[in-house]
Amino acid sequence: MSKRAVKVAVISDVHLGFLGCKAKELNKYLKSIKPEILVINGDFVDIWQFRTYYFPKAHAKVIQRIFKLAADGTKIYLLTGNHDEALRNYSGMSLGNIELEDKLILELDGKTHWFFHGDIFDVTMRGSRWLAKLGNTGYELLILLNKFVNGLRYLFGKGSINFTKAIKDATKRGVKKLNNYEMAAANIAIDKGYDVVINGHIHLPVIKEIETENGSVTYMNSGDWVENMTALEYHNGKWELIHYNNLKFENPYLKFDINDLP
């Protein structure tokens, strides 16, 4: 099957090793593209929630897929986040086509793009890390409860509900408002003369223009692979926000969507 050729693909907040990680869906997405560059913008592995007894095959297959992409010629930048911050001790290391960094600057069609995870703007990370970790454990329990509730609904012939996403979005929006997250990233990017700033961390996928009295910048967030299942793609000089559930593939002989991929 032919794959979509893209110049740059960006994913973040995969959280491998975490109960809520949508590893199967991410692996299907990665199998559907052929990027020149793949940027993994933080929290690829969830070291906070890592358990020796919980690392499903689907999670391992994502790692295998990353190495396969690298072996096939894709340049991969693995950027560190707060959930895999232990890797920051090894920033600057490389293995073949894979580079480990804390931040990244790319020139794309004459525009300077600044990539970094974005946890530096989160006061819950700077001031009360223990509180952030406690909240993460509570969220994992909430996912288990959500699965139990949906199991009961299935038995009674009702559709599933996702109250974890609603709670997560509300919490992240509160953090964003408290810290003025997007504006902080934009102001620094404008001050440094960058054209585009790309973050992860808050799990709120978006592409938007931000204007201040000092200038303007394109702000983007690649979302996550726990709730939103989103990515950013750059092709033919344009960025696009990709939603996994909206992806469809078509050719003159066959129509199918990404969920049909083996």
Image (spheres, helix red, strand yellow):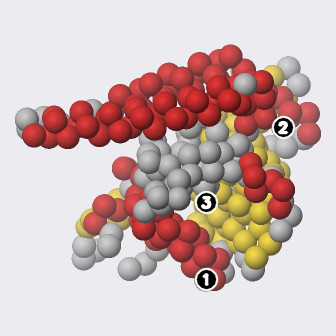
Q: Is residue 92 above or below residue 130?
A: below
Mark 1 lies on a secondary structure that is: loop
Q: Residue at x 68, y 29 (%)?
A: 130
Q: Residue at x 72, y 63 (%)?
A: 77
Q: Nearer the viewer, residue 110 or 179?
A: 179
Spatial CA distance of label 3 from label 2 is: 21 Å
User: What kind of residue is marked 2?
Assistant: Ala
Spatial CA distance of label 1 from label 3 is: 15 Å
Give the crowd class for mark 3: few <14, some 14-19, many >=20 residues within 10 Å. many
- Asked if residue 50 can be seen in this view, the reply is yes
Mark 2 lies on a secondary structure that is: helix
Does the residue at mark 2 contact the one at mark 1 (Cβ under 8 Å)?
A: no
Asked whether, in this view, residue 209 is left or right of residue 112, the answer is left
Q: Is residue 7 above or below residue 135?
A: below
Which disc is residue 189 wearing?
A: 2
Q: Nearer the viewer, residue 260 or 130?
A: 130
Which mark sits nearer the N-terminus, 3 or 2?
Answer: 3
Q: Is residue 193 above or below residue 37?
A: above
What count of labels does the image hold? Answer: 3
Which disc is residue 9 wearing?
A: 3
| Residue tagged 1 | 72
User: What kind of residue is marked 1?
Assistant: Asp
What percent of the width, then of the height, locates residue 195?
80, 43
Asked whether, in this view, residue 59 is left or right of residue 10, the answer is left
Give the crowd class for mark 1: few <14, some 14-19, many >=20 residues within 10 Å. few
Q: Residue at x 86, y 33 (%)?
A: 188
- Asked if residue 234 can be seen in this view, the reply is no
Which quadrant is home to the C terminus? bottom left
